[in-house]
Amino acid sequence: MFCTPESYADWVGSPYAGEAAATTPLLVVEGDATCSLPSPGALPVVVAFVGSDLGGDGPAGADLIVGPHDLAHLQSAVAQNPVACTSLAVLLRNPPSNTESGLAAESAVYSTLQAGPEFERWRQANPSSTPDDLGTECVVSAERIGTTLQICLDRPGRHNAFSVAMRDQLYEILAMAIVDDTVEHIELRGIGPSFCSGGDLAQFGSRPDPATAHVTRLMRSPARLLDLLSAKTTARIHGYALGGGIEMAAFAGEVVAHPDTLIGLPEPGLGLIPGAGGTVSITRRCGRWRTAALALATDTIDAQTALRWGLVDRIEPGGTT
């Protein structure tokens, strides 16, 4: 639904706005970028303001700023998975007081959506297959060079898709780095054509029940450890840095991108939200409006856009593994 700032204010202030949101999950506001928009609070609706370009300037009350050419993508995303998209918008409106509470809130919403009809529809259209590693293969390598610990995601044939085995092995390595005071610097890289293409889709249908998955996600969270190690960590990304890949990398104190890097948050297209810490890490780096724009209004952004947004700290050619 398209509206002016005035009609939007009337809509969001109506006692019937909650009922209207059931059939109107997207509000597109057109007006002056300096206008004031009231926050929609906990209403399950995505509020987009049409500005000059994606992630540009706009009123604080909006969930994201889009350019005119981004509207079709946004409208399609919300139409296909309104519950996931509006859930992400509501979550991002309520910034956590700390990393731990942010990860817990993100995981709770993610787990709820795992039990929802949108993710189930995606699962039915994309039946799970047998993963190529079942926990016995080494998919994360670590090498100590002086006081530097180099950690490499090592599933190059799958663009380092983030599997359960990769999560567990990365967690163990990061945990050891925390207790080893002689580790002064950590470099996180990906071997092969990409840093990390996100969660391993072959395992998405093999999850336990959502409640157990929520508890496991909190117990075995590389994001939590990366946050604790952020001051001494550099993430070097290249190729695809999607979903959990960019979510984890964004916790690093320094993120260096190769010029070929493409960054995206594809989870809403699966009926989910980012679940590897991205609502905390990416929002911390570039704000909730750009986080929502990345997830809802575009497939990927390039390295130059990521640099302009503050999602990466610098761009360097070479250095891929």
Image (spheres, grey):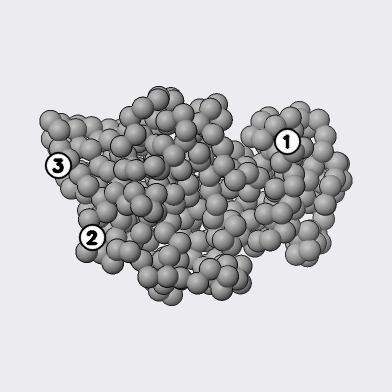
Which kind of residue does numbered mark 3 sit on?
Answer: Asp
Looking at marks 3 and 2 on the same chain, the residue that comes earlier in the sequence is marked by: 2
Cα separation between marks 3 and 2: 25 Å
Residue drawn at (71%, 54%), measured in percent from left and top?
76
Tell me the crowding category of disc 1: few under 14, some 14 to 19, or many 20 or more residues within 10 angstroms, Cα based: some
Which corner quadrant holds the C terminus? top left
Labels in figure, total: 3
Horizontal and vertical percent position of residue 57: 68, 30
Residue to which mark 3 is pinned = 180
Q: Amino acid at mark 1?
A: Gly
Q: Residues within 10 Å of mark 3 (few under 14, many from 20)?
A: few
Q: Picture quarter containing residue 199? A: bottom left
* Viewer-proximal residue among 303 and 104: 303
Which residue is at 43% across, 75% downward? Answer: 209
Q: Residue at x 65, y 61 (%)?
A: 81
* Cα gap from disc 2 to disc 1, whole angstroms: 45 Å
